[in-house]
Amino acid sequence: MTCAAPYIPEPLLEQLKPEGIMVIPVGNYPQELYKVTKDSKGHIHKKRKGEVVFVPLIGKYGFRKNLEC
């Protein structure tokens, strides 16, 4: 993911294949970078990797357009 979301969008978790990996920045400024994996049984695991700064995701699963960073 190349922009920060307020939370990890459910559609992205659904698209993640078993044994897949997603790296996503979550939250406001600064964001927390998460490594998200799905195991072979379909369970989701999240691991915090540190603070980062990305542009915000805007739209249905993102922030409101008037968000100030």
Image (cartoon, rainbow, N blue to C red):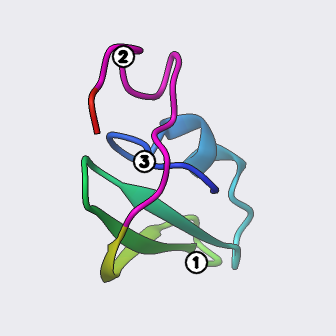
Q: Give yes or no for contact between labels 2 and 3 (Cβ–Cβ under 8 Å).
A: no
For residue 45, above or below residue 5: below
Amino acid marked by disc 2? Arg
For residue 67, above or below residue 12: above
For residue 67, above or below residue 54: above
* Residue where numbered disc 2 is placed: 64
Which dot marks residue 19?
none
Mark 1 or mark 3: which is in front?
3
**Residue 44 at x, y percent in the picture:** 46, 66
Q: Is residue 4 left or right of residue 40?
A: left
| 62 falls in the magenta region | yes
* Secondary structure found at label 1: loop
* Number of numbered discs: 3
Q: Determine the image quadrant of residue 23.
A: bottom right
Give whichever of 56, 23 is nearer the camera: 56
Mark 2 or mark 1: which is in front?
2
Which dot marks residue 39?
1
Q: Residue at x 34, y 43 (%)?
A: 7
Amino acid marked by disc 3? Ile
* Residue where numbered disc 3 is placed: 8
Which numbered disc, 2 or 3, marks the residue that appears first in the sequence?
Answer: 3
Which numbered disc, 1 or 3, marks the residue that appears first in the sequence?
Answer: 3
**Residue 13 at x, y percent in the picture:** 56, 50
Whole-number angstrom distance, CA of label 1 to CA of label 3: 17 Å
**Residue 56 at x, y percent in the picture:** 45, 40
Q: Residues within 10 Å of mark 2 (few under 14, many from 20)?
A: few
